[in-house]
Image: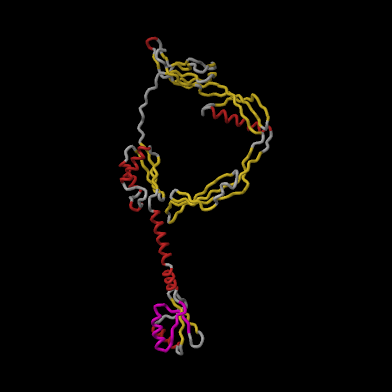
Amino acid sequence: MNRRHGPSDIYVKLTGNYTEAVVNQCLREGVIIKNITRAEGESMECFIPSSELSYLERIAEESDCEVEVLKVSLIEKYTTLMKKRAGFIAGMLMFIILLILLSQMIWKIEIEGAQPVLEHNIQKNLQEMGITTGTFAFFLPSPEEIQKEILEKTEGTTWIGVEKRGTTYHFEVVEQSLPEKETPPAPRHVIAKKTAVINTIYAEKGQVLVKRNELVHEGQILISGFIGKDKHARTVAAEGEVLGETWYKVSVEIPMKPQADTLTGKSEKKYFLKMFGYELPVWGFSAESAFEVYKKSERKYDLELWGKEFPINWNVTTFQESNIVNQSSSSKETLRQAKYAAENKIKSRLGGEAVIKEGKILHEESQNGKVKLVMHYQVLEDITSEAPIIQGE
């Protein structure tokens, strides 16, 4: 007798005067009986496979005994439960099937790197290939085959990359770039765009009219477009770089007690569900108005099943209360910060290749809780500009 019962076994009770004879006859005929226990009187209880119940009932009837089923098998119990919940189970299956179908549908087509006209042509070619929103991805060829076909159909492209990102097809386009024919520049002078003292001259074309350490003014010709003499005279497009020392005066004001933005530790969260581009608030409707001053951060959780990305997102926006605090600083530190602010201000006005040679304090005063600083800067920069040569000069 096997003492372990399985999911198809039922628990029965055998009653009558000859229960032992019934058990012995079952064993002789090969009927499987498990975990036999004696109940009150001559009764016995045991587990048998549900398929053996008819054999046990026949043998028990021959010995004037009765068989009562006390517990049905696990399989029968779950089968009955599934029949009662057939609608719910069918709904779950339909939901899973729907999710699988939605994950295989194209919800978005992205085209990056193409001009509007070329993008329109690519969209038109994709429609001819059957690649549109709402199409099932398993009806489409592989991204490699799509890439080959769309590249053959679309003129004016060097390369088109195709990538499937969940329910989105992403196309990255590299357009053909033909070298433009350069038109020769018109005759011109190189002139000074501001007053400066000449430091260095690099002339590529034209005749240099100034020298080092010479003071020049705005509009003065530095490199002339006229070259040669008499019958050999001609005009060219003067080119070159002239570095000159220029001067700037910068004024800044900064508070003597700078303010710092700190977090108080209090926060509120707002939750919403984003489906197919629409946002549905779920919780925390008043989170944004909970604090007067706050810092905002967002986190997005994408829905993925079986490695497939669905167009459904769970978004959490956190609002953290912040407080503006006045910080104290020494006069030396305040002056350092004012100099730093003045230097940043002058750098924002200069070109990227300009160099600050020297900076001096012209004026410094403190009033109304602020420090006012006036700085004088000596800068080395390119002072050139272009001026066309007018016919008849």
Please tell me which residue lies in front, 309 or 203: 309
Q: Can you give x and y, in whole percent of width and height, for residue 204 in the image?
A: 44, 20
The answer to whether 220 is drawn above or below residue 44 in the figure is above
Q: Can you give x and y, in whole percent of width and height, for residue 225 in the image?
A: 43, 16
Quarter that holds the N terminus: bottom left
Please tell me which residue lies in front, 377 or 166: 166
Is 69 a magenta residue?
yes
Residue at 59 percent across and 49 percent down: it is: 267
Q: Can you give x and y, in whole percent of width and height, for residue 195 in the image?
A: 54, 19
The answer to whether 3 is drawn above or below residue 311 in the figure is below
Please tell me which residue lies in front, 276 or 12: 276
Please tell me which residue lies in front, 377 or 314: 314
Question: Which portion, as a residue range, is magenta?
Answer: 44-71
- Whether residue 11 is visible to the viewer of this picture, yes or no, is yes
- Whether residue 301 is visible to the viewer of this picture, yes or no, is no
Residue at 33 percent across and 50 percent down: it is: 140
Residue farthest bottom in this picture: 17
Residue 115 lies in quadrant = top left
The answer to whether 29 is drawn above or below residue 284 in the figure is below
Is 382 a magenta residue?
no
Residue at 35 percent across and 52 percent down: it is: 136
Q: Can you give x and y, in whole percent of width and height, for residue 387 in the image?
A: 45, 19
Residue farthest top in this picture: 230
Residue at 35 percent across and 32 percent down: it is: 178
The answer to whether 126 is drawn above or below residue 12 in the figure is above
Horizontally, residue 187 falls left or right of residue 325, namely left
